[in-house]
Image (cartoon, rainbow, N blue to C red):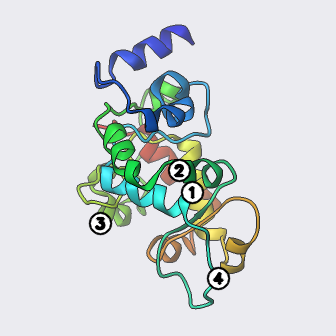
Amino acid sequence: MVLLTAAILSGTAASEDPPPAAVPCLRCHGPAHLAEKPRVPSILGQDAKYLIHQIAAFQREFVPRGSGFTRLERKHPVMNAQAPKVDHKDVGIVAGYFSRQACVNARDLDGGPSVPPPKPLLATRCFLCHGAAGHSRHTFIPTLAGQRQGYLRTQLLSFRDTHWIDLTRPGQSRVHSMMTRQGAYLTDAQIDDLAAYFAAQPCR
């Protein structure tokens, strides 16, 4: 584990000191701790505006409207407790810091097959928004390439299985006007194939 952590740190965007507001986030999302936390996504190198969007989604309290999914809504027992601690004036600073860090491949964190799995047919549909092989070129759309397989699987399941009423209940859920529709008819096997494929791609 020590060698793995050192290897990950050596590829991180060097000597930049984290701003005070980002320090609590590093306990889970920092490169030194990601290897110890297999369920935590890597946000290193993600687009800053995407990260701002996610932090805002975790900060706000969901207010039931009963009119369908018109924006991103996220519920997570840890993030809904931690995100509101980031002052609104610091959200952009935190997002900017993580966006400037070098990304880390899922294989380096969690291991994986030496030969990437074949591209699932459904992956081409994902490319329309998330970019070829999951390398996003669009603000507010995350890069999937190199993201952790277990995390990708959990998110796709959340998009598929979350119902409107679930957002008013404790626990974890996630909906999005586009992704909820895209995930609605995915099977467990298709979700597993997509998660494995994107996790095996290099993040850069």
**Residue displayed at 29% across by 66% down:** 128
Q: Is residue 109 above or below residue 87?
A: above
Query: How many numbered discs?
Result: 4
Query: Quick one: label 2 or label 4, which is nearer the N terminus?
Result: 4
Which sits in the foreground, 75 or 86? 86
Local SS, label 1: helix
Q: Nearer the viewer, mark 1 or mark 3?
A: 1
Q: Mark 3 or mark 2, which has the lower sequence index?
A: 3
Contact flag, marks 1 and 2 (Cβ < 8 Å):
yes
Label 3 neighbourhood size at 10 Å, few (<14), some (14-19), many (20+)? few
Find the distance from the CA under tag 1 to the CA under tag 4.
Answer: 22 Å
Residue 5 location in percent, x, y? 49, 16
Residue at the spot of label 4: 64
Q: Amino acid at mark 1?
A: Gln
- Residue 155 has which mark? 1
Quarter containing the N terminus: top right
Q: Spot the residue most to the right.
A: 170
